[in-house]
Amino acid sequence: MGKSLTRKILEPRILKGSWEPGTEIGIRIDQTLTQDATGTMAYLQFETMGIPKVQTELSVSYIDHNTLQVGFENADDHRYLASVARKYGLYLSRAGNGICHQVHLERFGKPGRTLLGSDSHTPTGGGIGMIAIGAGGLDVAMAMGGGPFYMSCPKVIQVKLKGALQPWVSAKDVALKMLELFGTKGNVGCIMEYAGEGLKTLSVPERATIANMGAEMGVTTSIFPSDETTLAFLKSQGREEAYAELAADADAEYFKTVEIDLSELEPLAALPHSPGNIARVRDIAGTPVQQVCLGSCTNSSYRDLATAAKVLEDKVSHPDVSFVVTPGSKQVVRNITKDGYYDMLVAAGGRFVEPCCGFCIGNGQSPNSGGVSLRTSNRNFEARSGTQDAQVFLVSPETAAAAVITGRITDPRDLGMAYPQVEAPATFLVDDRMIIRPEETPDPAAVEIQRGPNIGEPLKSEPYPADLVGLASIKLGDKITTDHIAPAGSRMKFRSNIKAYAEFVFENVDADFSRRASASRDAGVHNIIVAGASYGQGSSREHAAICPAFLGVKAVLAQSFERIHAANLVNFGILPLIFKDEADLAKVDASDRLEIPGIRKAIAEGTAIIVQNRTKGTSFEVKVELSERQRAIVLAGGSLAHAKESK
Ligand code: MIC
Ligand code: SF4
């Protein structure tokens, strides 16, 4: 039996374990990326490791998330990150240079390499044949220190593409089709590997869009082969030396294979409030729209903006529509300017924001109350836009542009126009002057780290308690996202300061949670979060574990967990407990007193764990699905404490 492309890249990099899907492996990481919102904490943790220089082939620190700078906090973070990059030998992509995933694809990604990023959309790099994985900041810090990244040896799913997309149907519709087929839960531990003759009809930015939104399915990553299309893209970036031809063996073995006929797809949308609520645009057409946002790491390439520009040429946005544009990178801005598309978008009423995450994360451009916002981004979780009751729909640039014109959700095929085909430039105008290279710092050891008052400290850990004597501090439903746990938007400026950020935990779900949890922590009672299925969807932000840990949360009891969040919980000494019988969720209510006598011993020995509900006088069994390594981490109180113990 031949090998999948995933296996060909990962197997030679296995440092711990072996290729047995479902078991834990530790892999070597070639490249890392961080962004400012997760990066400050990652580097604060890296600093505690006492390593003089990053140990990877290449590590890049991006500033792209918090660029609004309302108050001094973000600017302080940026200064801190710049000084860290100089001291430890990283590339720094300055604020204004673009969104990490877009810039990494353009300037640094290499087919066949592993990339670990402290952002859940790191898999965008799969568009050029990388195994690119999102993780918590601490895992990325460990990888920068040369340590292995631990993951579940993947179940590789082959996605065979055939045919070609019809006019007005684009890569976003493929990504949404995948979400319709696979949903947003139940895909933990899988990697999507694309193949088939339909591949050759998809450009690199289109492949990257599809790989990007694999994150919403909860897969470890997605990967495309590296072929002539990849070579043409790298050439257009002046980086053909990075090219390597890569594909799976013809007789490769897969966990399963699905087939998608591109020619059968039509414009799709994800309805509020989940990327998994898929509908045909045609079926929701007519809904009045108040905002359209074009951009985010999913759809902000030259191709996306130029296509929208051509649709909007000589037109102006509907009077009821606010039309926002965030290009993916400075390179995109300069190239669409050179080719006249920037002007077309501005003329159509486009409200340009610098190349950054912006609207996607609720950092500005929040919709009006109850407003319908059509966005080309990848997440439409409740309140993520910054407006609690906004209705966010995720669509392709084509569908977004159609709504700009009509003021209603419109199937772009009904515009009655010829589909504007956009050719990507054979050579992009490339300008890397907003990237500070490690070589520019002659004496890294002499660099002083700049810390403003917003820069806090890493979490102080303590060993796991012998007995859990706690309280169900909150009870939640299914698909609780990291946006529910640690809100983004205007709260993101506290990312470098755990104590300040912890005040907002579950803010939009239960505004009193943080106060209550601190009070029980101070009274010596352990806080326990109780939830349904797929807890921790979405972002890689480890703050969704760090802040609860700071508030004295010792366990999350759920029906199932998403991959990155479960790893983050372990990294910060919170035990992810899974109901053995899902129905037992009904046996717990908020404020119940829950106890697990002898929990420490049970984790160490791997014996059965029984939760006693003292309020109800009942009990039920829970499971711990952790490797031996992870159990040791939880017992130590988290990864940093564990690493110190093991020295
Ligand atoms: C997101 O899209 O939710 C973010 C903001 O990019 C996060 C990272 C963060 O919370 O800083 C992600 O996707 O991991
Ligand atoms: Fe930025 Fe949005 Fe992409 Fe996250 S999903 S990296 S916030 S653009």
Image (cartoon, grey):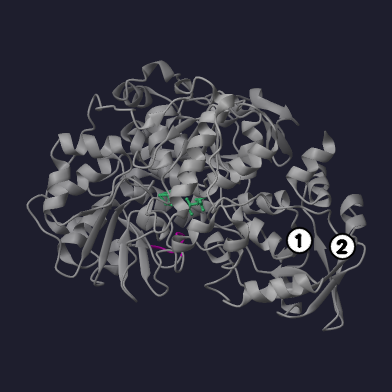
- Label 2 near label 1: C-beta < 8 Å? yes
Q: Nearer the viewer, residue 484 or 167?
A: 484
Q: Which residues are magenta?
A: 274-278
Residue at the image point whose x is 62% and y is 55% from the top: 562
**In the image, is residue 159 above or below residue 443?**
below
Residue 619: horizontal and vertical position, in percent? 86, 75
Q: Is residue 297 left or right of residue 285?
A: right
User: Label for residue 577?
Assistant: 1
- Going by the numbered disc 1, the residue's amino acid type is Leu
Residue at the image point whose x is 18% and y is 70% from the top: 320
Residue matched to label 2: 609
Ligand 1 within 8 Å, label 1 CB: no
Q: Residue furthest top?
A: 241
Q: Is residue 465 left or right of residue 398?
A: right
Residue 131 visible? The answer is no
Residue 62: horizontal and vertical position, in percent? 45, 39
Judge the density around disc 1: few (<14), some (14-19), many (≥20) Cα neighbours within 10 Å.
Answer: many
